[in-house]
């Protein structure tokens, strides 16, 4: 018999009074702007709301992505170099290998902290 998990649909929690108030104010501002500028398209309104959301987050998403990608490529390069070094017979001792592995673990941990900080 095959087991098929069924995930029930859970309704979204009700919005708090502050959330409803803020949504009302935002809707009012958008309506007033649209009345003052009738040539504004819905796509422009969505783009403006998206820009406002990005400014509230405060993080520079492309910079965090570039840093994360660069650090990930650096770790991949280090691992490839380590594997090449071991396959050529240069890694006879275990202490060097264990220090490299510990260094990579610390490096990946720092990468996670930097990525988390940049995303805020």
Image (cartoon, rainbow, N blue to C red):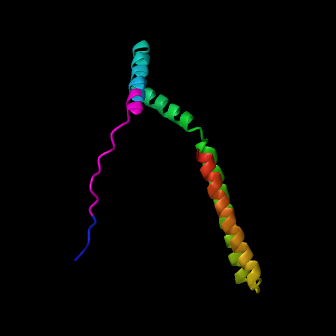
Furthest-left residue in this view: 1
Spot occupied by residue 60 in the image (x, y as percentages of width and height): 61, 41
Specify whether 16 is left or right of 115. left
The N terminus sits in image quarter: bottom left
Pick the front one: 114 or 88: 114
Q: Nearer the viewer, residue 45 or 97?
A: 97
Visible in this render: residue 99?
yes
Task: Determine if residue 40 is in view.
Answer: no
Who's the residue at 40% across and 29% down the image?
A: 23
Q: Quadrant of the C terminus?
A: top right
Q: Residue at x 76, y 86 (%)?
A: 92
Image x and y of residue 116, in percent: 60, 51
The image quadrant that residue 73 belongs to is bottom right
Q: Nearer the viewer, residue 94 or 73?
A: 94
Determine the image quadrant of residue 113.
bottom right
* Location of residue 114 with respect to 15 vertically, above or below: below
Magenta region includes residue 72: no
Magenta residues, dominant SS class: loop
Q: Is residue 62 left or right of residue 22?
A: right
Q: Residue at x 38, y 25 (%)?
A: 24
The magenta-colored residue range is: 6-21
Query: Residue 34, position in %: x, y?
Result: 41, 18
In terms of image quadrants, where is residue 54? Answer: top right
Residue at 54% of width from left, 34% of height from top? Answer: 56
**Please, is residue 52 above or below residue 103 in the view?**
above
Residue that protrudes farthest toward the front in the picture: 17
User: How many numbered circles are shown?
Assistant: 0
Residue 74 is situated, as x and y percent measured from the top left of the image, at 69, 62
From the viewer's perspective, is 97 left or right of 113? right
Q: Is residue 30 above or below residue 88?
A: above
């Amino acid at each position: 018999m095959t087991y098929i998990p069924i995930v029930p649909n859970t309704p979204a929690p009700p919005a708090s009074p502050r959330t409803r108030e803020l949504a009302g104010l935002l809707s009012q501002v958008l309506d007033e702007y649209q009345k003052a500028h009738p040539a504004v398209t819905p796509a422009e309104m969505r783009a403006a709301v998206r820009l406002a959301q990005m400014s509230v987050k405060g993080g520079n998403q492309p910079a965090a992505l570039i840093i994360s990608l660069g650090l990930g490529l650096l770790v991949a390069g280090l691992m490839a170099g380590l594997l090449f070094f071991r396959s050529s017979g240069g890694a006879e001792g275990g202490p060097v290998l264990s220090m490299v592995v510990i260094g990579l673990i610390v490096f990946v941990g720092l990468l996670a902290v930097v990525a988390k900080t940049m995303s805020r």
